[in-house]
Amino acid sequence: VSLSRHEGMNQWVAVNELIRKFVGFTNGVSEGRVVRDPVEGLAPRGKFLVSQLNEDTYAIDPSSYERYDLFVDIFESLDSEGTAALYVLVLPLLERAYSELGLPDGNMNDTLFKAIGRLLEVPVLSGEVRLIQPVVMYEFEDDSLERLSPAQKQVLRMGPTNTQRVQRKLSEISRALRAALQAN
């Protein structure tokens, strides 16, 4: 491990940076944005693969979904009650970071539950997912999918199995968070 990479890792795991990154990431998702910086180390490896169906239409290659397996495995391995207990423990730090980042009116709990809600709204698609490529980037052929927020479309790109796994874990963590917050 190079020194600069090691220093970068130390900065990433520094408590204040973790808190700020979590708050920024959560706020971004609650607004429908994809905030890549805090989770860059968990980004999928490899290319987004598609199959060309005809001159204008493509389909997501199901092997592209496997790029997200590591992230989903890690996320799914979280202990929901432990995650909720840690959240409650650091909530004062999260609220302070929320305020320091100059985020809009509201609070960390509302922002977190809004972010979770957005991700739980993502439809689980089965079968072929069709795309078009009007310019450089691919877009969903189905307008209702293309109108989803960038964060929601990112979950769609994980594939149906990973989407279900993430949503199941988010629901479990959400229930544990509500119980832990009510207990305090």
Image: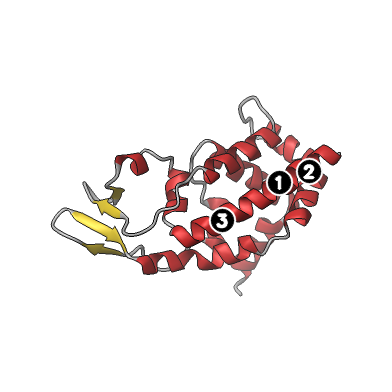
> How many angstroms separate mark 2 from mark 3 (CA)?
20 Å
**Label 2: element kind:** helix
Residue picked out by circle 1: 175
Specify the quadrant of the image occupied by residue 127.
bottom left
Amino acid type indicated by mark 1: Arg
x 80%, y 50%: residue: 85
**Label 1: element kind:** helix
Quarter of the image for the N terminus: give it: bottom right
Q: Disc 1, disc 2: CB below 8 Å?
A: yes
Rendered view: 121 above or below 49 = above
> How many angstroms separate mark 1 from mark 2 (CA)?
6 Å
Residue picked out by circle 2: 179
Disc 2 packing (10 Å; few <14; some 14–19; many ≥20)? some
Disc 1 packing (10 Å; few <14; some 14–19; many ≥20)? some
Specify the quadrant of the image occupied by residue 71.
bottom right
Residue picked out by circle 3: 166
x 13%, y 57%: residue: 55
x 66%, y 64%: residue: 77
Q: Earlier in the sequence, mark 2 or mark 3?
A: 3
> How many angstroms separate mark 1 from mark 3 (CA)?
14 Å
Residue 60 place in picture, x, y as percent: 32, 60
Quarter of the image for the C terminus: give it: top right
For this orientation, the residue located farthest to the top is 105
**Label 3: element kind:** helix
Residue closer to the observer: 120 or 75: 120
Scheme of colours in the image: secondary structure
Amino acid type indicated by mark 3: Val
x 74%, y 45%: residue: 177
Whether residue 170 appears in this view of the structure is: yes
